[in-house]
């Protein structure tokens, strides 16, 4: 039977498509009419054009599908119109889940995010799937919309018996980041030598192909209603930039900038973005998030699913190589 992948042309979605194809699974890629399809080059995949907000197109796409990977999401750090993000991430998720339920699919893997989870109380202790969420953990439209969408999926599992498993990718890095994503932009700018300074923050870095492999493991072995963090290694931003600098043979950034210094710069960057329509290079929500180390543990996925992520430096090296080969650097 066919696996339907929403957001199939995106960074994580295309990695899931390739992982399925590598196993010989038939795949139907659900994409918007305006989607960038460069990630479909050199692969054969059945493409279904539609929109998460168009229930009829989802009903058509579900026909004959056995499993669904709902990867699609509006992921931006700066959103002039937050209602657009909520429409895609919450309303779109409702449509996907209802269509999948009506089609009688065997299993759904819903791609949430570590953004919906609680953050550690201290920088030394990584959070996990059970870390309590506080109000100040959910401070951006992206986090708020993904949190609401995840709550919707959990409710449908509990009340309607929806056969869904939830995965929480951390910070994917690697090849085929065509946009690139906000994290990919950091890698590109660092490789160009355009990031001479950094703030004190931290991320859990994981290879995008390991995230894709985790999706397939969740489909095969995950418990219905279960949650699994798909991450790898916790690194400070200074360590990430240092790893990029080592690969491209540049000096690593040395200056740490206090968050309070960056906040007014972010305010001006957002103001300029409103005037020009160009995405700001730094946002106030981004600075607020950066005040904490966003460190997470994937132990549950490792033990329950057999998930085996590679070291973060492999992901960074593969990302730099791909960006370099495709003219980003």
Image: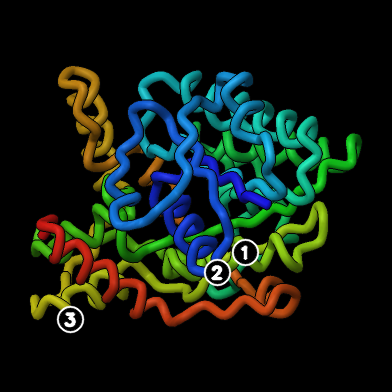
The quadrant holding residue 220 is bottom right
Write down the residue under mark 1. Answer: 216
**Secondary structure of residue under mark 2:** loop
* Frontmost residue, 309 versus 113: 309
Q: CA distance from mark 1 to mark 3?
A: 33 Å
Write down the residue under mark 3. Answer: 246
Q: CA distance from mark 2 to mark 3?
A: 35 Å
Residue 167 point in image, percent of width and height: 64, 56
Q: Residue at x 24, y 20 (%)?
A: 274
Q: Residue at x 39, y 52 (%)?
A: 11
Q: Residue at x 64, y 39 (%)?
A: 147
Query: Where 162 sits versus 259, above or below?
Result: above
Query: Where 63 sits versus 215, above or below?
Result: above
**Secondary structure of residue under mark 1:** helix
Disc number placed over residue 23 in the picture, else none: 2
Nearer the observer: mark 2 or 3; the answer is 2
Query: Where 42 sits versus 23, above or below?
Result: above
* Frontmost residue, 136 versus 158: 158
Q: CA distance from mark 1 to mark 2?
A: 10 Å
Bin the neighbour count of mark 2 within 10 Å (Cα to Cα): few under 14, some 14-19, many 20 and up: few
Is the C terminus in the top left, top right, bottom left or bottom right quadrant? bottom left
Residue 232 in view? yes
Q: Is residue 66 left or right of residue 254?
A: right
Bin the neighbour count of mark 3 within 10 Å (Cα to Cα): few under 14, some 14-19, many 20 and up: few
Residue 327 point in image, percent of width and height: 10, 57
Nearer the observer: mark 1 or 3; the answer is 1
Residue 151 point in image, percent of width and height: 73, 38
């Amino acid at each position: 039977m066919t696996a339907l992948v929403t957001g199939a042309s995106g960074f994580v979605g295309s990695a899931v498509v390739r992982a399925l194809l590598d196993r010989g699974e038939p795949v139907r890629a659900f994409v918007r009419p305006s989607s960038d399809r460069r990630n479909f080059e050199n692969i054969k995949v059945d493409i279904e054009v539609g929109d998460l907000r168009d229930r009829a197109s989802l009903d058509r796409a579900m026909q004959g599908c056995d499993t669904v990977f709902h990867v699609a999401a509006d992921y931006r750090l700066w959103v002039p119109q937050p209602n657009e993000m909520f429409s895609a991430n919450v309303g779109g998720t409702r449509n996907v889940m209802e269509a999948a339920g009506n089609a009688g699919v065997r299993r759904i893997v819903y791609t949430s995010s570590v953004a919906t989870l609680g953050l550690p109380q201290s920088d030394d202790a990584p959070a996990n799937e059970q870390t309590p969420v506080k109000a100040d953990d959910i401070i951006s439209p992206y986090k708020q919309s993904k949190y609401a969408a995840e709550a919707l999926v959990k409710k449908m599992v509990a009340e309607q018996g929806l056969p869904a498993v939830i995965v929480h990718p951390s910070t994917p890095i690697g090849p085929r980041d065509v946009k690139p994503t906000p994290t990919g932009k950091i890698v590109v700018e660092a490789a160009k030598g355009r990031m001479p300074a950094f703030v004190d923050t931290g991320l859990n870095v994981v290879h995008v192909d390991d995230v894709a492999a985790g999706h397939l493991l969740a489909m095969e072995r995950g418990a219905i209603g279960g949650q699994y963090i798909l991450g790898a290694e916790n690194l400070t931003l200074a360590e990430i930039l240092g790893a990029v600098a080592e690969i491209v043979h540049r000096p690593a950034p040395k200056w740490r900038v206090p968050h309070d210094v960056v906040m007014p710069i972010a305010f001006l960057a957002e103001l300029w973005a409103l005037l020009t329509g160009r995405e700001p290079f730094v946002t106030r929500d981004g600075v607020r998030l950066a005040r904490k180390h966003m460190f997470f543990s994937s132990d549950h996925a490792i033990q329950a699913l057999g998930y085996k992520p590679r070291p973060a430096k492999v992901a960074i090296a593969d990302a730099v190589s791909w960006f370099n080969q495709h003219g980003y650097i």
